[in-house]
Image (spheres, helix red, strand yellow):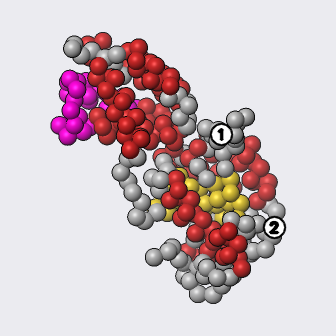
Amino acid sequence: MELQFDSIGQIAHATVVVASRREESLRCAARIAQALVCQGEGPLPCGVCRACRKAQAGIHPDIIRVQRPLDDKGRPKKEIPVDQIRAVAADAAVLPNESERKVYLIEDADCMNTAAQNAALKLLEEPPKGVYFLLCAANPALLLPTVRSRCAEWTCAGDETEADPELRKKAESFLSLTARGDRAELLRWCCANEEMDLRGCAAFLDCAADCAADRLTGRASAEGMSPAALLRLEALLVRCRKMLQVNTGVRHILGLLAVDAIAEEEGVQH
């Protein structure tokens, strides 16, 4: 069944929309945005009024999508910068075009840097009348506690939590290089993957920690790593994950893994 609301009052003025897959969080947020501009009667969104049809087509002027800026090669940058959130704050003061409400759908909200999140605090706590914010996040732990405390949280139902196969492959590759004690190859691997954004790095660290736990408990081959080595590695991955939450850069995290993932005594003899 599609997401519906009995009244606008069920929707908070600021909501973190959580899903492990980006597409699912965007789909869910778009549905909430549609409900907020709906002009029909009964459960919202009605799906048939003019506003709903425009929202479905992605052309409603009062649903504004905030996306990561692009670099000179047309690729999304790693972060949403503070200037972009300041521009949202300025635009939010402008009255809606067609609807009674104005909705800002912030894609990849967990990629806002610390300055951007701090700039959003007052806006989320005291938005202009009729203005709503939907923050899409695959890793809400990357949002500052002060941001999350100002928002309701909506977890998309039916979202698949199993790790993406490519992500699992990346995590297994990292663990295998660590198990072999091959410092040079591990350094090359870290350099090759330093273009990950904050969210991608967080997902990798979570997956790698899960893979280390599987090896520790015998659900997967330890490839010669001792229980003590696996415990130390898992603790390092968890520490790196916490560092991301205080806006440590991805390159710094991967540099730390390149240096500390293999201890002197952990090299495996073949």
Q: Is residue 261 magenta?
A: no
What number of labels is visible? 2
Image location (x, y in percent) of residue 88: 74, 53
Q: Mark 1 to mark 2: distance in Å?
A: 32 Å
Residue depicted at x 56% and y 59%: 26
Question: Front-most of 43 and 171?
Answer: 171
Image location (x, y in percent) of residue 181: 31, 17
Q: Amino acid at mark 1?
A: Arg
- In the image, 122: left or right of 157? right
Q: Is the residue marked by circle 2 packed among few (<14), some (14-19), or many (20+) residues within 10 Å?
A: some
- Residue 129, placed above or below residue 67: below
Start and end of the magenta stretch? 213-239
* Numbered disc in front, either 1 or 2: 1
Quadrant of residue 6 within the rendered picture: bottom right
Quadrant that contains the C terminus: top left
Q: Which residue is mark 1?
A: 75
Residue depicted at x 50% and y 22%: 191
Q: Which residue is mark 2?
A: 95
The residue tagged with tag 2: helix, strand or loop? loop
One can see residue 61 in this view: yes
Tell me whether circle 1 and circle 2 mark residues in contact (CB < 8 Å).
Answer: no
Q: Amino acid at mark 2?
A: Leu
Toward the left, the furthest residue is 218
Residue depicted at x 40% and y 46%: 164
The residue tagged with tag 1: helix, strand or loop? loop
Image location (x, y in percent) of residue 226: 20, 24
Q: Main secondary structure of the magenta part?
A: helix
